[in-house]
Amino acid sequence: MDVQYLTGEGLAKRIRKVMTGNKPWMCVAFLGPTWVEELFDGRVMPENLRVVCDLRMGMTVQTALRAGGAPSNKCLRHLPDQQMHAKIYASDKGAVICSANASHAALSSADRIEDGVWLPPGGKAYRDAAATFERRYRKAEPVDADALAKAPEHLGGLSAAAVGVNEAVDLGNSPTLLQILRHDPEAFKGIRFVFSNEEVAEAVKVGAKAIMDEMVSNHEGAAEDEEAGSHKYHYFANWERKESDWPGLFISVYRGSNGKIYLGMYRHLRFIPEVPNGEGETEEVFVAAKVRWNTGGAGFGDLRKLATVRQCETELGVLFKNEGTFERVAGKVLDAGSVRKALELT
């Protein structure tokens, strides 16, 4: 048998196949919270599975370690004095050396490219990889209670000192929404995300605007409405929420029927409980004013300057290319941590 190049779904399938073999072992940097389900197709993790993972770079969280049996599983280990960025999955069915971490994003997501090679069992390259693992495994230490406690609970707002790495993640001067959601969701403090894929009926828009215009003409909330931009309101209908539960500042993520993603930063203005929908019924409508993208500072929750709205839309468009992925968040109002968890942005 020859060495085989693998990519995409083929790579993920081969990794899972290899991990069903006898005496499985892994030398994989980052373990996602659902890594056991990803590798073993929902089955129980083999008792004889030996794992060396990385805790120095702070990307393997406590949930993932507990899924692997920490702190009592002596076969789940880490190298306390070295960063370990390798990704190797192996058993008597061969070894896969690749770019893919043990996470949903790497093994089940359609928006990420991962490549690797499969080494057939018995060959020199396979034997060399196995021998190297044995040396690392003997040197590694079990993920005990102390190591577990030092691992991050989540990936948001982590400093280099907190996770024991040499450098914090550098997001650059203008990161995208996904970059911040992955690495620093606490940056969205006081800001929520509103996900929708249903268009507000034109009759509702007309009715809500008429009510807002009447309020302005009667000098109700005139100062607020000046900021709406000459009465250019935006409407969010039938969310079954009390006004007190609707976010004051939020980022709207709308997926059109053509799959295109539309982003906007908004400030809530008013809640209108009964707006005619043109079909003899009424709808509850939250009216918002659109804030200029990257207003930043106190103008929008002290959020740092982001990449352009087009860049962020394009990146999210790739993530939500599969409608099923968007369905995880559609119709929900979430904080950044909940978005990260729902979309498994590991």
Image: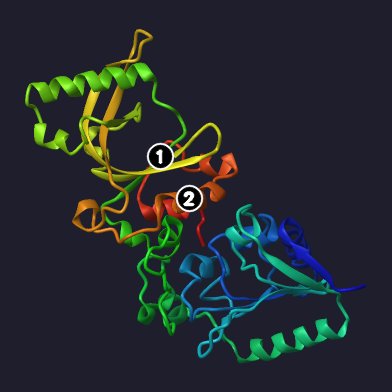
Residue type at mark 2: give it. Ala
Residue tagged by mark 2? 342
Please tell me which residue is depicted at 45% across the width and 29% down the height of the picture: 198
Q: How is the image coloured?
A: rainbow
Q: Is residue 139 left or right of residue 335?
A: right
In the rendering, at what x and y percent does residue 202 appear? Answer: 37, 19
Residue tagged by mark 1? 332
Is 22 in front, or is 215?
A: 215
| Residue 24 makes an appearance in the image | no
Residue type at mark 1: give it. Lys
Is 344 in front, or is 254?
A: 254
Q: Where does the N terminus fall, quadrant-wise?
A: bottom right
Identify whether 73 is placed above or below 129: above
Q: Classify mark 2: helix, strand or loop.
A: helix
Identify whether 321 is placed above or below 64: above
Outermost residue, front direction? 230
